[in-house]
Amino acid sequence: MSLRLSQPVTTFRSREVLNLPIHGAKKPFCRFKASWQEVAGVLIFSAIPFTAVKAIANSSIGASLQRRMLEKKQIYKENSAKLKALSDQAKMESDWYGENRPRWLGPLAFNYPSYLNGELPGDYGFDIAGLSQDPEKLQGYFNFEVVHARWAMLAALGALVPEILDLSGAFHFAEPVWWRVGYSKLKGDTLDYLGIPGLHIAGSQGVIIIAICQAILMLGPEYARYCGIEALEPLGIYLPGDINYPGGILFDPLNLSKDSGAYEELKVKEMKNGRLAMVAWLGFYAQAALTGKGPVQNFLDHIADPYHNNLLSNIQESGLFPR
């Protein structure tokens, strides 16, 4: 994503002041620059995926797809049961599940909670607050963690890649730093996607309209997640897995689940990297607040001069604490 700015945005620390427009007048936040026709067009465009799926499901094409799926559903279920049995066997043989799995304190003796039995991927016996004693709550927390871990990994990729491409000279963005894009949107600036002038899509709308569009776009996926793996059966698509790992051609196109042992280990790796990404975002927020720079530039500054560019020096220079 690229951004065209009518006013320069300066790098700032918490004690510094952002540049204001001419005559010192503060630019209003959430300013709407689009006509009602543009707003209506964006809202309709956002609703197309969900409405298209519903239309296909209720059409003769959808009925034909459902019939074909129902004819083979029993075979699909039998194959799914076999994969589940292989998965359970792989967990029993894996070093990442069960009683002999690694724990968060390593070799240190500790009274780990008995309700964390190593059945879920990434279970290191950590629940010092006792939040997961109820099995239903435990499963719910795990579902939420999987979703947030995946979003964090995708978001981290979106924050790092534009800045890397811009700093390396591979692709120029008018504004590659992740937080400045959002800040500029709050000021009412217009977004040019991929640096292509005039390619705005939802870029000329205010933050409220963009939030509404995102809610509409997410309506379909969230509804499908709420309904479970049966949500796509009206389209003739059978998913052999569960809510977190649906499988099938849509969610496992590389057929990674064919090797049950490797697949169960990949689930653990996903949780590890997802948790790392969530913690990384805390670092992104702190870096943006203290230095006003992107994470890649902060890393390059630290490598160039570790003594003067580190967490402690940034906190000291920010003025958060008196010297």
Image (tube, grey):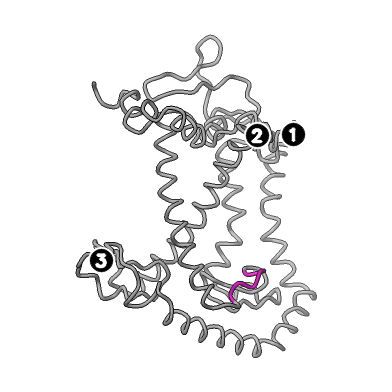
In the rendered view, does 146 fall on the left or right side of 311? right
> Which comes sooner in the sequence, label 1 or label 2?
2
User: Which residue is drawn at the image coordinates 30% and 62% (left, top)?
Assistant: 104
Quick one: SS at disc 3?
loop
Q: Is residue 138 above or below residue 281?
A: below
Give the percent coordinates (x, y) of residue 137: 35, 69
User: Which residue is drawn at the image coordinates 43% and 32% (left, top)?
Assistant: 302
Main secondary structure along the magenta-highlighted residues: loop
Q: Nearer the viewer, mark 3 or mark 2?
A: 3
Quick one: SS at disc 2?
strand
> Which comes sooner in the sequence, label 3 or label 2?
2
Contact between labelled residues 1 and 3, with CB atoms less than 8 Å apart: no
Q: Is residue 279 above or below residue 94?
A: above
> Can residue 254 be found in the magenta stretch?
yes
In the rendered view, does 139 fall on the left or right side of 294? left
Distance from disc 3 to disc 1, alpha carbons, whole Å, reads 55 Å
Give the percent coordinates (x, y) of residue 135: 34, 75
> Which comes sooner in the sequence, label 3 or label 1?
3
Q: What range is drawn magenta here?
A: 252-257
Contact between labelled residues 2 and 1, with CB atoms less than 8 Å apart: yes
User: In the rendered structure, which amino acid carries the disc numbered 2?
Assistant: Ser
User: In the rendered structure, which amino acid carries the disc numbered 1?
Assistant: Ile
Q: Which residue is mark 2?
A: 2
Q: Which residue is mark 3?
A: 107
Frontmost residue, 106 versus 285 = 106
Q: Quadrant of the C terminus?
A: top left
Give the percent coordinates (x, y) of residue 179: 51, 35
Q: Quadrant of the N terminus?
A: top right
Contact between labelled residues 2 and 3, with CB atoms less than 8 Å apart: no
